[in-house]
């Protein structure tokens, strides 16, 4: 079984066990929605063939359409313009670095490669996506779209140079690359983000919550509400 499929099964188990609730909340997804997406990716990858756009361009529903649709949804749900820009910049950088690695660093001959290149691309995309994206949403968007941008770069170069090589979006190992990149980016954002939050306050911030990527004091809000209630009571007494 491919690593991407194994990873999706592990994520499903974590969701059913309730251990992924915090991450899903940050991604604006419910447990049911996340499971439905995972099932759709697995089923479409196994049972649906690649869809041909032209003679040399095709796409896979599970490895391309569904992950990209999810990335677009998360982009729309991003709460700030800064988060959106981080996602875009991280995706472009990840795509460029993956292409450069593919073109200039890894051996061109498959038999000379000691590791599956798709896993290398996924790891590169995931790390860059976290470093530049920072938030869980931006990291996932950048991880997925970084892989897509690599394919787009290759497709454009092939067209310019009249190279008849096929471009398969999400196919031929693309599912593994996309899934690993997206999950790894979110995992890094969650683990390192949690560590940073603890170092920046830990239990001292137990009365605080996140709002638009920043700590906001729940205690302060309660005090403001209390002051407002007191002012309203005084107003009622004055009217009497």
Image (cartoon, rainbow, N blue to C red):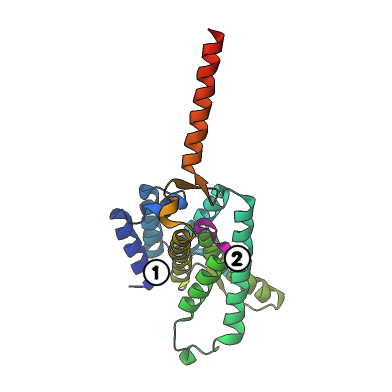
Q: Residue furthest left?
A: 17
Q: Label 1: how many residues lie within 10 Å, few (<14), some (14-19) or many (20+)?
A: many
Dividing the picture into quadrants, the one containing residue 194 is bottom left
Decide whether the magenta segment is chiefly helix, strand or loop. helix
Q: Is residue 38 above or below residue 1?
A: above
Q: Position of residue 141 (x, y in %)?
A: 54, 59
Q: Is residue 55 magenta?
A: no
- The magenta stretch is 133-138
Q: Residue furthest right?
A: 160
Residue pointed to by mark 2? 90
Q: Which one is in front in this view, the residue at disc 2 or the one at disc 1?
A: 2
Residue at figure coordinates x 50%, y 24% from the top left: 230
- Residue at (36% x, 53% y) in the render: 35
In the rendered image, residue 98, in percent from the top left (x then y), is placed at 57, 76
Q: Is residue 58 visible?
A: no
Q: Which mark is residue 38?
A: none
Residue 152 in the image: above or below residue 25: below
Which of these two is toward me, 114 or 168?
Answer: 114
Secondary element at image label 2: helix
Report the label total.
2
Compare residues 2 and 205 and report the one nearer the observer. 205
Tell me which label, 2 or 1, sits earlier in the chain: 1
Provide the secondary structure element on which disc 1 rests: helix
Q: Residues within 10 Å of mark 2 (few under 14, many from 20)?
A: many
Q: Residue furthest top?
A: 240
Q: Give the CA distance from mark 2 to mark 1.
A: 22 Å
Q: Is residue 107 above or below residue 165?
A: below
Q: Which sits in the foreground, 54 or 19? A: 19
Tell me residue 140's x, y (percent): 50, 61
Q: Which residue is mark 1?
A: 4
Q: Residue at x 32, y 64 (%)?
A: 10
């Amino acid at each position: 079984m491919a690593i991407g499929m194994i990873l999706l099964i592990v994520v499903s188990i974590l969701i059913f066990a309730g251990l992924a609730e915090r991450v899903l909340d940050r991604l604006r997804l419910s447990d049911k929605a996340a499971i439905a997406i995972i099932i759709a990716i697995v089923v479409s990858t196994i049972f649906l063939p690649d869809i041909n756009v032209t003679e040399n361009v095709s796409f896979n529903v599970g490895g391309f359409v569904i992950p990209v649709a999810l990335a677009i949804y998360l982009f729309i749900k991003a709460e700030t313009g800064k988060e959106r820009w981080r996602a875009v910049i991280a995706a472009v950088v990840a795509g460029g670095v993956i292409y450069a690695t593919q073109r200039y660093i890894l051996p061109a001959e498959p038999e000379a490669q000691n590791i599956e290149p798709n896993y290398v691309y996924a790891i590169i995309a995931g790390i860059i996506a976290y470093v530049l994206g920072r938030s869980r949403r931006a990291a996932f968007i950048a991880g997925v779209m970084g892989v897509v941008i690599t394919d787009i770069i290759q497709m454009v170069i092939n067209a310019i140079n009249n190279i008849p090589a096929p471009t398969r979006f999400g196919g031929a190992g693309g599912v593994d690359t996309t899934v690993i990149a997206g999950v790894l980016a979110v995992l890094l954002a969650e683990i390192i983000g949690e560590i940073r939050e603890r170092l920046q306050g830990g239990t001292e911030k137990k009365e605080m919550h996140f709002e638009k990527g920043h700590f906001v004091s729940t205690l302060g809000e309660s005090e403001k509400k209390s002051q407002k209630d007191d002012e309203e009571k005084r107003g009622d007494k004055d009217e009497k």
